[in-house]
Image: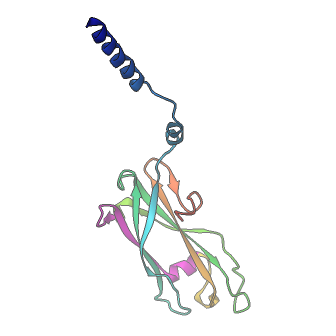
Amino acid sequence: KNIFKIFGLAVVLVFGTISCTEEDNVIDDVLGGVTSGGVLRTISIIANEIPIGDDTALFSIEVEEQDNQDGALLESVDVYTTFSDGSPDDGDSSAGTTTEVFLFNIPASSFTPGPFGLPRTTITIPATDLIAAVGLTSDALFGGDTFTTRLALNLTDGRTFSSDNAGGIIT
């Protein structure tokens, strides 16, 4: 009878020791190097066309920031633009494609909690500001010309996320 008790105790100790040891699993190696960043999600496009000669036109979108701390890592968002002359045969094509220009910074304090508790804000850029930023006048614009706006999400830990360091599924 004591042999069965000792044998049973030995089996429990052996299986207990085996189940408590840490194994080298591939998933541990994969997840060990993973860090979380942040993303700006476009909630709605309010206005994204600038009719020629309309000085009241604007670019406007609502964005929401998400990170692994529910928005607590948001420091600010930088807004940039470039201009591409898509109609060199019509009008002034001297601008060609301009280099990227910094427009402004939106601090975290300009964001308010959205319906899911994540920070949201509306980014609005008057057409006159876009045109002036790249050194043009409104009479230099023709159909096919484009302004490209890029947003850069700055986090409180010093990291920045934008189209140049995000995967295709994010951009």
Q: Residue furthest left?
A: 1
Q: Which residue does the image show at 27% across and 6% down from the upper left?
A: 2
Number of callouts in the render? 0
Q: Is residue 17 left or right of residue 114?
A: right
Q: Residue furthest right?
A: 89
Q: Position of residue 128 (x, y in %)?
A: 51, 83
Q: Is residue 119 magenta?
A: yes
Q: Residue furthest top?
A: 2
Q: Is residue 121 magenta?
A: yes
63 to 139, vertically: above or below: above
Residue 1 placement: quadrant: top left
98 to 10, vertically: above or below: below
Q: Which residue does the image show at 36% across and 51% down from the upper left?
A: 69
120 to 126, vertically: above or below: above
11 to 156, vertically: above or below: above
Q: Which residues are magenta?
A: 112-133
Closer-to-camera residue (41/60): 41
Q: Position of residue 63 (x, y in %)?
A: 41, 69
Q: Which residue does the image show at 36% across and 56% down from the upper left?
A: 71
Q: Position of residue 27 (x, y in %)?
A: 51, 40
Closer-to-camera residue (86/105): 86
Q: Quadrant of the C terminus?
A: bottom right
